[in-house]
Amino acid sequence: MHLYQILSTEYYVSMDSWIRSLIVLLATGLVGFLGVWQASALVSTRGVLGPTLFQSISPISSLFAIALTIGVASVIAGFVAKYTSTTTGMFILGFSLFAMAMKLEGMQELVMNNGNFNVLALEAVFISVLVLLGTLIVFAIGGPLKCISKPTPEDHLTKQVGIAFVISLAILPVIWFIATTPAKGQVLGASAVGGVIIALLSRQFLHSMQPIILFALPIFWGGIGYLIGLLLGDTSPVSFAQQKVSSLLFPMPIEYAAGIIIGLALGLGWTSSDEENTQTVTEKKVAP
């Protein structure tokens, strides 16, 4: 009888894992379709898609599109997180922005339109606020990360937030060294690598704080990076053609958001304990 219970438990755990994988796959496809669909609302003055919200033909439509994408994707991601893990839910949220970013033009289009990078900095701050709200939804529905220890009296919130600000600043040197061109793969890949590095740093220095603000802070620092990049060089089409534009200007805000969320979710998932991903299933199947 004991052997039967063990085999039965293994069967149901395996079955549950297969169902969860299917749910994740369907949710990823759904939010990806949503991101691609809403990308059509971001049209530049030259009639191509992207790359910004505030400097599109219809900023109101663009703002509605990004808010709708993040809002709907965060709800879907939250329910997926409830039955899988919160890091999986955040990956799904990031994938919706990844799909949108892949449909949009990049920095070259902004330079050709003589775009304003100061306005781009404001857009990065705006998107970071939307991402923070979306992250709160995912964590509210899916629950906190189980492998984060409970705060002790020595873990002051102000100190933890300060550490989070410093850790998230790592995104700028990563972009500086890795994003050597404004190509889509370069900027998304560099942002994702930055997210992974921030996740590793958070595991090292933030033991009792849920990483909610870490999904938004690097995007905010990306906006500051635009201002630093403007001080380091010109942004004219001639400078762009001569490759004299600072690499801090290469990622657009949506590309920052997509890469950072996906990279941070993957990094936190890789460094999570087995309990984070299996506790719910095991408890449900072996309960008497």
Image (cartoon, rainbow, N blue to C red):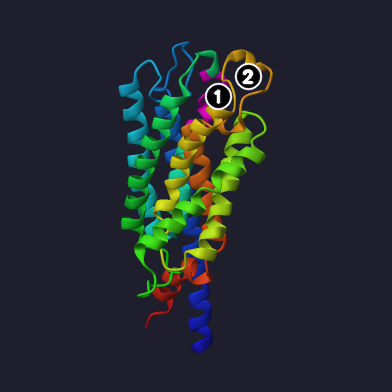
Please say whether residue 59 is visible from this viewpoint.
yes
Q: Is residue 61 above or below residue 165?
A: above
Does the segment drawn in magenta span residue 101? yes
Does the segment drawn in magenta span residue 102? yes
The residue carrying mark 1 is 107
Residue at the outermost top position? 46
The picture places residue 160, in percent across and down from the top left corner, at 41, 62
Residue at the outermost bottom position? 1
Q: Is residue 196 left or right of residue 133?
A: right
Q: Quadrant of residue 190?
A: top right
Using the image as rendered, state which of residue 67 and residue 53 is in the foreground. Answer: 53
Q: Which image quarter is the C terminus in?
A: bottom left
Please say whether residue 23 is visible from this viewpoint.
no
The residue carrying mark 2 is 240
Q: Is the magenta region chiefly helix, strand or loop?
A: helix
For the magenta stretch, what is the residue range? 98-110
Q: Nearer the viewer, mark 2 or mark 1?
A: 2
Residue at the spot 56% in from the left edge and 63% down from the top edge? 271
Q: Is residue 126 above or below residue 233?
A: below
Inspect the image, locate mark 1, and give the three-letter code of the amino acid beneath it: Met
Residue at the spot 44% in from the left edge and 60% down from the top edge? 85
Residue at the spot 60% in from the left edge and 31% down from the top edge? 184
The disc label shown at residue 284, or none: none
The picture places residue 164, in percent across and down from the top left corner, at 45, 55
Q: Is residue 75 above or below residue 68?
A: below
Using the image as rendered, state which of residue 224 and residue 109 is in the foreground. Answer: 224
Q: Cα distance, mark 2 to mark 1?
A: 10 Å
Using the image as rendered, state which of residue 2 and residue 278 is in the foreground. Answer: 278
The picture places residue 101, in percent across and down from the top left corner, at 50, 31
The secondary structure type at the circle numbered 2 is helix
The picture places residue 214, in percent across and down from the top left corner, at 44, 52
The secondary structure type at the circle numbered 1 is helix
